[in-house]
Amino acid sequence: MRSEISQCLSQCRRAFISLAALSGVANVFALTGSIFMLAVYDRVIPSGSVPTLVSLGLIALLVYVFMAFIDIARGWMLTRIGLIIEESLTGRTYDLLVRKAASGSNEASGVVRDLDQVRGFLSSMGPTALFDLPWIPIYLAICFSFHWAIGLTVVAGALILVALTLVSEVVTKQPSKNLHEAQNRRFSLMQASQNNAETLQAMGMTLAMSGSWRAVSGRIVEVSRVMADMQTVLSTTSRTFRMVLQSFVLSVGAYLVINQDATGGIMIASSILSSRALAPIELSIAHWKSFVAARQSRTRLDELLQSNPPEHQSFAIPAPQRTLTCEQVSLSPPNVGRTIVHNVSFGLRAGEGLGIIGATGSGKSTLVRSLVGLWPPLSGVVRLDGSPLNQWSSTQRGRFIGYLPQRVALFEGTIAQNIARFDPDAEPDRIVSVARSSGIHEMIARLPNGYDTMIGEGGTGLSGGQSQRVGLARALYGDPFLLVLDEPNSNLDHDGELALQNAMMQTRARGGIVIIVAHRPSALSAVDHVLVMHDGRVQQMGPRDEILQSMMSRPAAPPVTAASAA
């Protein structure tokens, strides 16, 4: 099966055929200089005909103008091919980036840069060398037609330039890979620093962390310097050698003229033709760095895209309305290498609420990430109305799941857009209704621009409590069947907690299921079941009042089996 990039390139088949045709015409027109010189030296000068010289000059000028238009057309076509590749894959790469990040993996951190690298190379003049290379034998054949000595000289020069190209492949492959890895590390460090800028600045950690930044940047500078130095040496060597070869061919031609084995026109024409014959190889060397980078980027993109196929909008299973069951679920967060949650089982019916409590590190947040489909279980299954979560795509699941993570992630845009999950068809009445349900309508109404108030990335412009309540409203948008809240009251005041409890009760009243991870007992007033976790296992589960009373009256019991907990 062909990769997605290959499929995109196949869509441009006609454009590539047109490029090949234009390149053929351009290479035929490239003989103009040699033919013009041959005619001038062997026809015009001996005859002394000025009209012939003017006619030949005008014809050559016209051909050069056509050559310019052809080169412009080739550049435009390559630019558009690059844009077609980006437009075809940009949505796919964004989906891949979000999916991998949501699963806790940074594997796709460089996917956008890889796509830019592929598009940038395809949009450059580098690919034109590939269309010009097949014409080298034709130029060599013409050189041999002038004289075998001229042909052999140009062939020897071509072999030396090919050797330089192979050297470019060897010396730039590993440094290019090292540069990509260093750039990914710096990008990850940049994101971490931006996300935790307040902590770095307030606690005086900027200077200490800048050491890591300087180390990574220094690595990038060093590898970039090595690659640039190599490329400079190779490009300069190839360009210098081509000029030397051109002069050497001229010298061979002069020797043949002295021995009356060639004419002066052949001497000049062969010198020009040798330069043109070797130009594609020199162009390949000049663009070799970007070619190697684009090839490595394509390989990485192919591997990521093939290992993460697009989500298919499968058969439209009806939205769940009855039950949530968690069956023997064990979980290991990405890049952790050990199991955090062990054999958790429970079941909930429509209208019920579950509070998950336990010490820090007991696996509460890990468990709820699996309940909303972010982290697939190592074993076991999460079902809604008997169907596994993976039978819905993330887009389909989003219509009946509301999720408020510990760290509320708001996006740059208006408050209304954030509440409506950036749905372009969101109805204002629904946005206001869900804002009232989460108790933030009055707060929004007091803002200068109301629901049109712009907020920055991460909720800049709002307090922590306000951001959390906007995140709650977003989770409630669309009346989800499953509402999962991970410590939703960590930044809330008394009014905010009342609004949270009211929102949970309303969700249960309309037949939804509520799951809340909490440390404060007050947050459990709106649920009827409590699950206690310890070291990733179910320690207790049952009616809320019984569990809370049991926890207050006796020490924590040892973990029970998943079967008995269920």
Image (cartoon, helix red, strand yellow):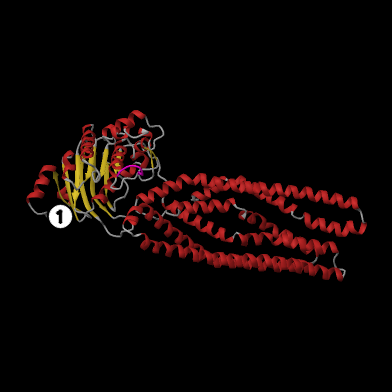
Front one among 232 and 101: 232
Q: How many marks?
A: 1
Res 287 seen here: yes
Q: Position of residue 177 (x, y in %)?
A: 49, 62
Instruction: Please rate how many residues cluster around mark 1, counting C-alpha atoms within 10 Å: few if below 14, some from 14 to 19, many from 20.
Output: some
Find residue 281 and report its image quarter: bottom right
Residue displayed at 9% across by 46% down:
549
Left or right: 134 with respect to 307? right
Front one among 469 and 288: 469
Front one among 200 and 56: 200
Q: Position of residue 6 (x, y in %)?
A: 53, 50
Q: Which residue is mark 1?
A: 559
Provide the residue span drawn in magenta.
459-463
Left or right: 486 with respect to 183? left
Residue displayed at 23% across by 47% down:
327
Q: Position of residue 465 (x, y in %)?
A: 27, 42
Going by the numbered disc 1, the residue's amino acid type is Pro
Residue displayed at 32% across by 38% down:
474
